[in-house]
Amino acid sequence: MERMQRTSVVIIGAGPSGSVASAILKQHDIDCVILERSTFPRFSIGESLLPACMESLKKANMFEAVNQGGFQFKNGAAFRYQNQYTHFDFTQKYSDGEGTTFQVPRGPFDKLLADEAQKQGVPIRYQHTVTQVDVERDKPCLTVTDEVGVEYHIEADFILDASGYGRVLPRLLHLEQPSGLPPRIALFTHVTDNITPELASELNYDRNKITIYVHPDNQSVWYWLIPFTHGRCSVGVVGSPEFFEDYPQDEIAALKQLTREEPHLKLLFRDAEFCHMSGKIGGYSANVKHLATDNYALLGNAGEFLDPVFSSGVTIAMKSAEMAAETLIRKFNGEQVDWQKEYAEPLMVGVNTFRAYVEGWYDSRFQDVVFYENANPEIKKKISSILAGYAWDTTNPYVASPEKRLKTLAELCRNG
C-alpha cells in the first residue's frame, strides 16, 4: 500500500455501530473505509438485542438478513427475585416500531452485519490497528498498522470511532472521564443448558425472553440468562468487585456456585454443561469529555457505556451510528452542522433515559416498579417501551422526564 491514502470517512471498528453507520453512508455514495483490529467472528457480550435495534437495521438495509440469520426469537424480558416473577411483553408497548427481536451470539451476529456492509460495497480491513491520530489538521489523519505490520497513513474528512470497549479515540486523544457509576464486574460464560420443554413448562421458563434474576440475598447483584438456539445460552453475573472476593478465583467455579445460589436458576440448570471458556470485564462504565467535534464522532461504547442490565449497549451503538451517519450526510451535502446540538445532545436523551433506570435498578427504585403486582397497564406499556429500547421517544413521559417520573412511580409502588 502507498504510505498516504485518502477517503471521505474512516470508521474504526466493524462491530454493529461501524457496520450500520457504513451501510447508511454507502447508500448516499459517501466513501468510507472500516479499520478493524481483529478478525471476525470474534467473541463479545451484549447478546440480547432490543426491538429498537431492528429499526436501525432497517435503515442499514440489514433487517431481512438478520431475520433470516437463524437467531433465537425474543419478544420480551422476564424478571425474578426470590418468589416474585414478572415479565414485559415488548409487543405491548407505548412507542411505535418493532416489538420483537433476537438473542444473538455476537460472533456470528457481528460477522453477519459486517458481511452485509461488505456486500453493500463497504471495504473492511481486518487486522488493521490504529496507533496514532492527528485531529488538529484540516483533515484528520490516522496512522495504521496492517495485518503484516506495515505502517501507513490515511487521511479523511471525518472519523467515526466505533471501536467499542477498545475506545481508540478516547485513549489516543485523552478524552476519557470517570462515568459516575460505581465500578462493577461482569462474569459470564456460555452453557449447554439441556432445558427440556417439560422442564421449561414446569418452571415457567420462557425461552423467548431474556431473564434477569436478582440475587436472593443481595439486591445489587443480578444475573442474566440469554437463551440461544440449539440449546445453548449465555449466563452472567454482575456485582461489585467486593462481592466477588468471596467466590473462587476460577471463573467457571464461581459461576457454578453463583447459579446454585439462585433457587430457580439452580433447578433450571440441573443438567447444564458449562463451557470451559469464561469472560470477565470490570470497570466497564465509561464517559468522555465530549462525543463529537467537526472532525470526529464517538459511537456506542466508544463514547458512553452504562451497564449491561437492560441490554442497552447494542441499542445505543446502533442508534448513535444511525444519528451520526444522518448528520454526516447533511454535512457532505454542504449543510452547516452543529455536532453538539445535532448529534451529541439528541443521542444523550436516550443515554440519560437508560442511565436513570440503571441507577434506579441498583438503588432498588426501579426494582420496586418492576415487581409491583398491581401495575397500571398504560404505565406498564410506557416502561415496556423503554425496556424495548425506545429511549428516544420523548412523547413517552417516562423518557421526557425519566428521573422525576421514576421517583414518583417508585414512591407510588412502595406505598401500594
Image (cartoon, rainbow, N blue to C red):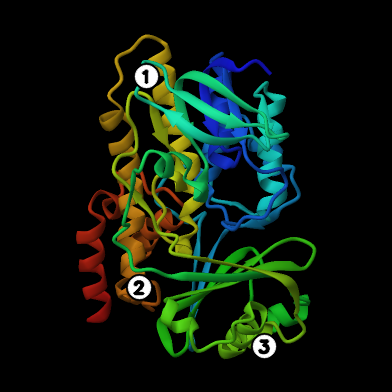
Q: Position of residue 200 (x, y in %)?
A: 70, 78
Disc assigned to residue 158: none
Disc assigned to residue 137: 1
- Left or right of residue 383: residue 164: right
Query: With respect to residue 351, does 228 lie above or below?
Result: below
Q: CA distance from mark 1 to mark 2?
A: 44 Å
Residue depicted at 40% across the width and 43% down the height: 170
Q: Are marks 1 and 2 in contact (CB under 8 Å)?
A: no
Q: Earlier in the sequence, mark 1 or mark 2?
A: 1
Foreground mark, 1 or 2? 1
Disc assigned to residue 267: 3
- The residue wearing badge 2 is 362
Q: Quadrant of the N terminus?
A: top right
On the image, which quarter does residue 29 sit in? Answer: top right
Q: Position of residue 111 (x, y in %)?
A: 70, 42
- SS assignment at label 1: loop
Label 2 is placed on what type of residue? Answer: Tyr
Foreground mark, 1 or 3? 1
On the image, which quarter does residue 152 sit in? Answer: top right
Residue depicted at 44% across the width and 77% down the height: 241
Residue depicted at 61% across the width and 70% down the height: 188
Q: How many marks?
A: 3
Label 1 is placed on what type of residue? Answer: Arg
Q: Position of residue 160 (x, y in %)?
A: 47, 31
Q: Are marks 1 and 3 in contact (CB under 8 Å)?
A: no
- Left or right of residue 19: residue 303: left
